[in-house]
């Protein structure tokens, strides 16, 4: 059906990675369902300490929460991993250590350049995969990792149509040169120069034919987010999923002022309650989470841009935890989606979605069944 995607010693029969979606959208139920269908299921590390503390009614730190969620995802078989954003600076090291100790198959890391990832903990089989938006960024990472004696096991190239944070300035999002198709060849060249590791493309990929097209253009695999957001197994709240179903193309915008305190453009459904509050300055800055901290003048992680300036920034930690129903009694949600979210008209199961992506019709899928075994070389 598809060529296999081989990353380090992992072998994926379906070259589809379900992108990590924070906060609390891609947890172990979604990741393990995707893994069971032969793709790679990725949990998000964002705010896992709070999410698991609430789920299990006991206190977790970032290391413990990561360790437990990765272990849960892995326990059901297949290939699973975790997305750990560099921008979540305070918990970055603990999340990486927890994931490696729990034996994550892969760590995918973006929202900033993961320059020190190979040196944080001794890696055994875990594949280390940076997310980039340009050949230049990938080249910088390869050179830095080379000095640490490591070569990326694969790279994700995320174009400007993706959900979540974007690695482009807001005025660069719709430039012809930044179309995923045009970003791919130079990124592929850098990957070949540094040892020919796989390049996986992300952002705006929606159908089986899209996957075929990108494989024909030279990609080794694809990563999808928005399609998996709109599944039964995703942990987005019902109102989040309802907002996705209702959104049309004009409703999906790239927010920047007000925008994410990470400082990167962030794609949202414009009717999201927290975004509307931020637009009319109706919300007082009351950040009490502190995942997106930057360093103060003494080099300590104490500064949240949204707390200091709620006219330019919305409180993304509270808005996103609320969108996963973990904080909805206290804060109003913000909904992030990819540009193709307007095409979603129903919530489906991961099984049904993966069959559609594989190009298998309903009757074929009944005959074939699915496999959950991990394939390792
Ligand atoms: C709801 C949502 C949350 C996301 N959260 C993250 C995240 O926490 N970290 C990250 O690196 N990417 C995140 N992304 C990006 C996805 O992992 C994926 O690369 C991207 O959505 C692919 O584009 P698509 O949505 O058009 O398929 C998120 C995307 C969505 C839709």
Image (spheres, rainbow, N blue to C red):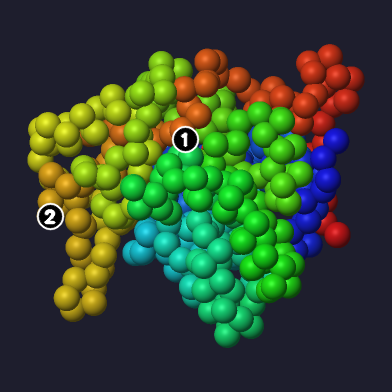
Q: Is residue 46 above or below residue 130?
A: above
Q: In this view, does 125 lie above or below 270?
A: below
Mark identifier at residue 48 = none
Of the 4 image quadrants, the one containing the N terminus is top right
**Picture quadrant of residue 173:** top left
Disc 1 beta carbon < 8 A from ligand 1? yes
Task: Write the residue at 72% across / 47% down.
Answer: 217
On residue 308, which mark appears?
A: 2
In this image, 304 relative to 376: left or right?
left
**Residue at the bottom extreme of this rendering:** 147
Mark 1 falls on what kind of element?
A: loop
Q: Is the C terminus in the top left, top right, bottom left or bottom right quadrant?
A: bottom right
Residue 51 visible to an observer of this rendering:
no
| Residue found 64% across the figure and 68% down from its top | 190
Badge 1: how crowded within 10 Å, few (<14), some, or many (20+)?
A: many
Query: How many numbered discs, if any?
Result: 2
Placement of 366 over or under 98, stated as above or below: above
Residue 286 can be seen in this image: yes
* Label 1 with label 2: CB-CB less than 8 Å: no
Which residue is at 57% across, 53% downward? 183
Query: Would you say 355 lies left or right of 327 here?
Result: right
- Residue 280 drawn at (x, y percent): 12, 31
Residue 103 in percent (x, y) is at 65, 61
Residue farthest to the front?
A: 176
Residue at 35% across, 24% down: 251
> What percent of the width, then of the height, locates residue 328?
28, 30
* Residue highlighted by disc 1: 338
Q: Is mark 2 on a helix, strand or loop?
A: helix
How packed is label 2: few (under 14 Cα within 10 Å), some, or many (20 or more)? some
Real-space CA distance between mark 1 and mark 2, rounded to the nearest whole angstrom: 28 Å
Q: Could you tell whether 72 is left or right of 95 in the image? A: right
**Front residue of this view, candidates 161 and 186:** 186
């Amino acid at each position: 059906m598809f060529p296999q995607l081989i990353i380090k010693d992992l072998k994926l029969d379906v070259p589809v990675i379900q992108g990590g979606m924070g906060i609390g959208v891609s947890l172990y139920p979604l990741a393990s369902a995707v893994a069971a269908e032969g793709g790679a299921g990725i949990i998000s590390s964002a705010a896992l300490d709070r999410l698991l503390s609430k789920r299990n009614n006991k206190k977790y730190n970032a290391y413990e929460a990561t360790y437990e969620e990765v272990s849960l995802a892995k326990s059901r078989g297949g290939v699973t991993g975790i997305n750990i954003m560099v921008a979540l600076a305070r918990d970055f090291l603990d999340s990486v250590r927890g994931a490696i100790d729990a034996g994550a198959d892969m760590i995918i890391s973006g929202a900033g350049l993961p320059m020190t990832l190979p040196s944080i903990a001794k890696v055994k089989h875990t594949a280390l995969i940076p997310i980039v938006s340009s050949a230049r960024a990938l080249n910088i990472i390869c050179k830095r990792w080379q000095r640490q004696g490591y070569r990326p096991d694969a790279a994700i190239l995320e174009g400007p149509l993706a959900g979540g944070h974007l690695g482009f300035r807001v005025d660069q999002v719709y430039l012809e040169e930044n179309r995923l198709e045009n970003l791919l060849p130079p990124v592929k060249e850098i990957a070949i120069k540094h040892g020919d590791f796989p390049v996986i493309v992300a952002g705006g990929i929606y159908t089986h034919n899209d996957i075929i097209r990108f494989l024909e253009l030279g990609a080794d695999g694809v990563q999808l987010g928005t399609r998996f957001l709109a599944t039964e197994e995703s942990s987005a709240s019902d109102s989040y999923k309802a907002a996705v179903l209702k959104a049309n193309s004009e409703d999906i915008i790239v927010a920047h002022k007000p925008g994410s305190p990470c400082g990167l453009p962030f794609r949202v459904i414009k009717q999201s309650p927290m975004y509307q509050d931020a637009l009319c300055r109706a919300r007082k800055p009351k950040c009490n989470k502190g995942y997106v901290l930057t360093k103060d003048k003494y080099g300590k992680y104490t500064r949240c841009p949204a707390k200091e300036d709620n006219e330019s920034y919305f409180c993304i930690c509270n808005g996103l935890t609320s969108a996963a129903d973990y904080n909805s009694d206290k804060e109003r949600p913000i909904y992030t989606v990819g540009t193709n979210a307007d095409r979603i008209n129903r919530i489906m199961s991961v099984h049904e979605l993966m069959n559609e992506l594989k190009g298998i019709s309903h009757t074929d899928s009944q005959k074939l069944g699915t496999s959950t075994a991990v394939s390792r070389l």
